[in-house]
Image (tube, grey):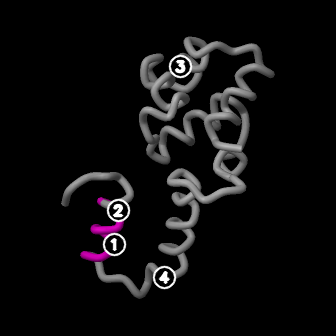
Amino acid sequence: MRWQDKVKQLMESQNLNQKELSKKSGITEASVSRYLSGDRKPRMDIIINFAQALGVTTDYLLSEDDTTSIGAYTEIATAIARNGKNLSAEEKNKLIALILGTDI
């Protein structure tokens, strides 16, 4: 199940609409809509906000049967944690920029 489907399922079980999730998560209602429809890819801080607002762990939201870009966050974090000491500062900065989708 995709993370968006889990969020929608949790919203339904907690009787929350997008506006209420927006207030609880601190994410604008328009952005909540874009993330849940798949129009926009969330950063990890957004996933954390959703998880906290819904009372679940990020692991729950991100665990998927298939490998997607969101599930890749966990894989990337694990790879960096395991190999971080072997990376130069420049390589770490490039990885961070890649993950965040920014230029350095």
Nearer to us in this view, 86 or 61? 61
Locate residue 34, reporting x and y percent. Answer: 45, 27
Q: Amino acid at mark 4?
A: Asn
Residue 92 magenta-highlighted: yes
Which part of the image, by quadrant, shows the N terminus? top right
Q: Determine which quarter of the picture holds residue 19.
A: top right
Locate residue 90, reporting x and y percent. Answer: 25, 75
Q: Which residue is mark 4?
A: 83
Task: Look at the numbered discs 1 and 2 and tell me whether their residues touch, using CB distance below 8 Å.
Answer: yes
Pick out the residue farthest to the right.
13
Of labels 3 and 1, earlier in sequence is 3
Q: Give the side of residue 9 with respect to residue 32, left or right.
A: right
Q: Name the residue: 54% across, 16% down.
A: 23
Mark 3: few, some, or many residues within 10 Å (few <14, many ≥20)? many
Q: Name the residue: 71% across, 22% down.
A: 11
| In the image, residue 28 above or below residue 42 | above
Residues at marks 2 and 4, CA–CA distance in whole angstroms: 14 Å
| In the image, residue 62 above or below residue 79 | above
Q: Which residues are magenta?
A: 90-97
Q: Name the residue: 63% across, 29% down.
A: 53
Nearer to us in this view, 69 or 86? 69
Mark 2: few, some, or many residues within 10 Å (few <14, many ≥20)? some
Q: Which residue is mark 1?
A: 92
Residues at marks 3 and 1, CA–CA distance in whole angstroms: 33 Å
Which disc number belongs to residue 27? Answer: none
Of labels 1 and 4, earlier in sequence is 4
Task: Look at the numbered discs 4 and 3 and tell me whether their residues touch, using CB distance below 8 Å.
Answer: no
Q: Which residue is mark 2?
A: 96
Q: Amino acid at mark 3?
A: Ser
Q: Which residue is mark 3?
A: 22
| In the image, residue 38 above or below residue 30 | below
